[in-house]
Image (spheres, grey):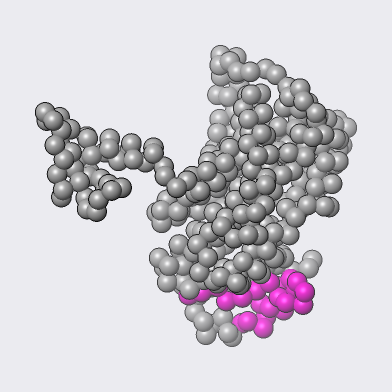
Amino acid sequence: MKGPCIMPGGDRDAYDAVEPILKAIAVKINGEPCCTYIGPGGAGHFVKMVHNGIEYAIMQVIAEAYYVLKEGLGLETEKIHKLFREWTENQVMSGYLMEISTEILGTKDRKTGRPIIEVIKDTAKQKGTGKWTSQEAYDLGVPVHSISAALLARIISAYRDERIAASSVLEGPDEKHKGDKDKFAQHMSRALDASIRMAYAQGFALIRAGSKEYNYDLKPSEIARIWRGGCIIRSKLLPLIEEAFTENPDLTNLLIVPQFSEVLNDEMSSLRYVVQTAISCGIPVPVLSQSITYFDSYRAKVLPAASFIQAMRDFFGAHTYERFDEPGVYHTLWTQEGRPEYKK
């Protein structure tokens, strides 16, 4: 055992009293213990909850990559294992979850001799931390597309009997990707990297919002630093995240810093191609696809659908709206002749 990452919160004096013990226990990265005072009250629990939400998203997107390579390309598990090993050794997205995924894909079932992943029943269970993260994000008004999609993927996996029954009634495409498989694998590695980056971006955006709402005074750079070792979501991306928040502690979203934006601008074409392929093959990829939705929504200068929704809300509920061209709040009398508009 190299030790855990420890995220303690609560009374500062109490922390100071036990700090030497906690830091002695914690894993060390470059000689620094992966332990720091997170903040008052429930700050430590909040940060650990968000950690687990990010974990849900990364786990799901890795699993989706396996699913697409297996069912969409028709690759054998041994070939996918080789790809994962290459990605884990050479890619910046490499981390604990990629490492254990590689180990899983290389493990044989002792009873059948088949890859063990092929004999594990397809119901992914949960203990609630992904749900808590999503609920907290909704309460704080923070978009966490990837985390929520990962939670829903686990929930629907539990409907196994219904899925089996529906499979004989509901039709879908029955085809494999017919293009160059090696080239597609390159696209998949880039799509994985892009999706994992967006999972971190959403998690740290939630940390920022929670810090402000609950007066936790969280330090994202320190959180990224201690997450570099001893925790499930440790990865080679975390030093980049630590650097970004060190340079700008008030950073609103990781997507806009060069360490992320330049890479994502390059990788998004691969992510779109992978999702397009998965959809054409009838393969559900909730986190891969929601990563695109998050990216496109966040970069959108204008979201016309939101304008349309606000118009509908005003029509049936007089909820009012704002205009692009004039200040103020307005309401249209939609059912009256001429549909007059009034400034509230």
**Residue in the picture at 41% in, 42% down:** 303
Q: Nearer the viewer, residue 307 or 28?
A: 307
Residue 108, compared with residue 258, is above or below; it is: above
Residue 341, compared with residue 249, is above or below; it is: above
Q: Is residue 19 left or right of residue 85?
A: left
Quarter-of-image position of residue 275: top right
Q: Is residue 120 visible?
A: no
Q: Is residue 229 left or right of residue 46?
A: right
Residue 8, compared with residue 49, is above or below; it is: below
**Residue in the picture at 56% in, 70% down:** 248
- Most extreme residue toward the left is 337
Q: Is residue 273 visible?
A: yes
Quarter-of-image position of residue 230: bottom right
Residue 160, compared with residue 200, is above or below; it is: above
Q: Nearer the viewer, residue 17 or 271?
A: 271
The location of residue 99, given as percent across then percent down, is: 78, 51
**Residue in the picture at 64% in, 24% down:** 280
The location of residue 12, given as percent across then percent down, is: 51, 82
Q: Is residue 39 magenta?
A: yes
Q: Is residue 307 left or right of residue 96?
A: left
In this picture, which residue range is highlighted in magenta?
18-40
Q: Is residue 246 magenta?
A: no
Q: Quadrant of the N terminus?
A: bottom right
Q: Nearer the viewer, residue 116 or 137?
A: 137
Total labels: the figure holds 0
**Residue in the picture at 63% in, 18% down:** 173
The location of residue 131, given as percent across then percent down, is: 50, 48
Q: Nearer the viewer, residue 342 or 285?
A: 342
Quarter-of-image position of residue 2: bottom right
Q: Is residue 233 left or right of residue 206?
A: right
- Most extreme residue toward the front is 325
